[in-house]
Amino acid sequence: MATPTLQVALDLLELDRAVEIADEAVRGGADWIEVGTPLIKSEGMQAVRTLRERFPGHEIVADMKIADTGAVEVEMAAKSGAGVVCILADADDAVIVEAVRSARKYGVRLMADLINVADPVSRSRELAALGVDYINAHVGIDQQMIGRSSLDLLRRLAGEVGTPVAVAGGLDAETASEAVAAGASIVIVGGNIVKAADVTGAARRVREAIDQPEIRPREEESQDAAIRRLFEAVSALNVTDAMHRKGAMAGVVSICGRVKAVGRAVTVRTLAGDWAKPVEAIDVAGPGDVLVVRNEGRTDVAPWGELATHSAENRGVVGIVIDGAVRDVDDIREMKFPVFATATVPNAGEPKGLGEINTEVACCGQEVRPGDWIVADESGVVVVPRERAYEVARRAMEVKKNEERIREEIRRGRTLSEVSELLKWEKRH
Ligand SMILES: O=C(CO)[C@H](O)[C@H](O)COP(=O)(O)O
């Protein structure tokens, strides 16, 4: 078997950073350098020209995602120095045929991107017949976030397509290795290399993995387990960033400082500090749940204290969020149990049984339904609607990865404004 090609996808907005990251990726063993679609949209064909000049010994791939005017766009990429140009597999045949003619004229190869193609096997055969050089089994970034897998797509093509097959979409060292074992001859990796603080190390790990392809037995993981694993690995900040800066409760703080709670909400509505329903809710909750209590926002009377916290901990509850006050703060702090509240007060209410359990509540400015996910840490509490939890958890992990590289560039001496090119990206009115 020929040595598989490692293509690093530079899905960035800034050309200077892209050049630096490409240099580090090449040192880790990347063969081909892809000028990602966001970089082309941000910097134009100058990105292709610059990378061509800076890396004369490496193939430059222009991820144009061509949808129309096939000939012109292939010509632009070819004249700028690309050796491989990407076109959407879903483009009309008229576009593909023109792109192939242009590719032949300018001596470049065409890679067709199967993103969102309904019948990938028959479309790949048609594309091969039309003269496309490579098929890319690609699951796009937004599709990855809702659980689609590029390896599954690749496996559908195995043995069915004559042209060399590339694969892209959320690959890391482990899945890249499996992709080669499943027949990929070009492995495209973006985020898991370019967002790493140590790009060279990340590229090297993928390089070594694809040079020794193997299929490792994988443990099945339920979606709930994946959501919890991901939320436990990110911060509440990463989660609100992933939701376009939404979902954060207002005015609620951690009583115990540096603690974290991740779990599904069991909701409670109570009145005037009545602690019957919050305490009954402990018995309704299961291990891994978070109690979310609305006490009408009152801060003069507490529906929660140390004994309830002990009981909740015994039950396996992992956190309490109260839109209102809490008491016994010193004992709760000693327990280091994640309690989040808007205030502290010594008064307890009376256990009258007013209120209800597991109905929708408005809590510190957020709607919370039973089963919604809560991610809470020292910065505050975020609510994630249950139907979006998997997607948000995946996106939050991407936010965290993205920050790893930015942090590293700041450590090297750039300012945050420089790294993010703030002035360039200010909104024009
Ligand atoms: O074309 C792309 C997105 O449309 C990416 O380049 C491709 O998905 C590879 O990046 P990643 O490994 O981060 O998924």
Image (spheres, rainbow, N blue to C red):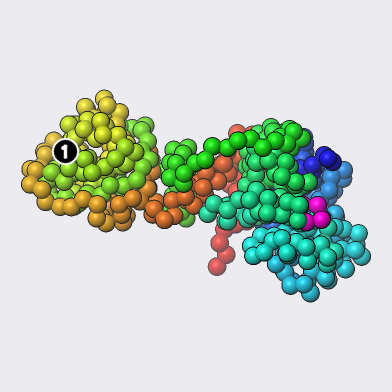
Q: Name the residue furthest bottom.
A: 94
Residue at 24% x, 55% y is 359
In the picture, which quadrant includes the C terminus? bottom right
Residue at 21% x, 50% y is 357
* Element carrying mark 1: loop
Observer-nearest residue: 207 or 298? 207
Q: Is residue 342 left or right of residue 45?
A: left
Q: Name the residue furthest front.
A: 159
Mark yes or no: residue 112 visible. Answer: yes
Observer-nearest residue: 217 or 286? 217
| Crowd around label 1: few <14 · some 14–19 · many ≥20 (10 Å) | some
In the picture, which quadrant includes the N terminus? top right
Q: Is residue 244 left or right of residue 213?
A: left
Q: Is residue 217 left or right of residue 236?
A: right
Quick check: is 325 in the magenta stretch? no
Task: Identify the residue position indicated by label 1 in the image.
Answer: 345
Above or below, 72 against 171 in this view is: below
Residue at 19% x, 35% y is 308
Name which residue type carries label 1: Val
Residue 426 lies, in percent from the top left, at 57, 58
Magenta residues span 161-165
Residue 27 lies, in percent from the top left, at 77, 35
Q: Quadrant of the rendered structure where residue 194 is?
A: top right
Please identify the dominant SS of the magenta region: loop
Observer-nearest residue: 295 or 206? 206
Residue at 79% x, 69% y is 96
